[in-house]
Image (cartoon, helix red, strand yellow):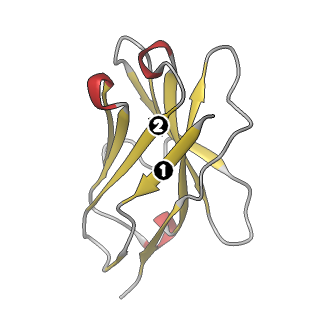
Amino acid sequence: QVHFVESGGSSVQPGGSLRLSCTASGIAFLNYVWGWFRQAPGKQRELVAAISTAASTNYSDSVNGRFAISRDNPKSTVYLQMNDLKPEDTGVYYCNSRRSTWSDHWGQGTQVTVSS
């Protein structure tokens, strides 16, 4: 059975940093593209960062230059380093995997709140 467990979310002030982790089980981690999604209050879930099997990365315009996604295949874990956080980064963050399409399996997410 596939499980994604996200962690690392917290409440921080603008300009602060957080590192999110997502550990997967029940899946051949290294064979998948991994992504971090964000769902802000009252908004649809959006993809903010993705990392390929070859570790190439892509970011949404809203986080490019501030966030960094990485992966540790032996640990079946994907990370999201978030720097210079802004109030608009507030939301629940989820990881997900993709071969041809993003999975319809989601974890519980981790809450990030950026507020002064």
Q: Pinpoint residue 55: horizontal percent, then vertical percent.
A: 34, 18
Q: How many marks?
A: 2
Residue occupied by mark 2:
24
Residue placed at 74% from the left, 56% from the top? 44
Residue 2: image quadrant is: top right
**In the visual, does 97 lie left or right of 29?**
right
Amino acid found under the numbered disc labelled 1: Val
Q: Pinpoint residue 47: horizontal percent, then vertical percent.
A: 59, 41
Residue 30: image quadrant is: top left
Residue occupied by mark 1:
5
Amino acid found under the numbered disc labelled 2: Ala
Labels 2 & 1 near each other (Cβ < 8 A): yes
Q: Nearer the viewer, residue 4 or 94?
A: 4
Q: Pinpoint residue 80: horizontal percent, then vertical percent.
A: 35, 46
Alpha carbon distance from label 2 to label 1:
6 Å
Q: Quadrant of the C terminus?
A: bottom left
**In the visual, does 71 lie left or right of 61?**
left
Residue placed at 41% from the left, 42% from the top? 23
**In the visual, does 17 lie left or right of 56?**
left
Res. 76 mark? none
Q: Is residue 19 above or below residue 24?
A: below
Q: Quadrant of the N terminus?
A: top right
Q: Residue furthest bottom?
A: 116
Q: Pinpoint residue 87: horizontal percent, then vertical percent.
A: 45, 74
**In the visual, does 90 lie left or right of 7?**
right
The mark that comes first in sequence, 2 or 1, is: 1
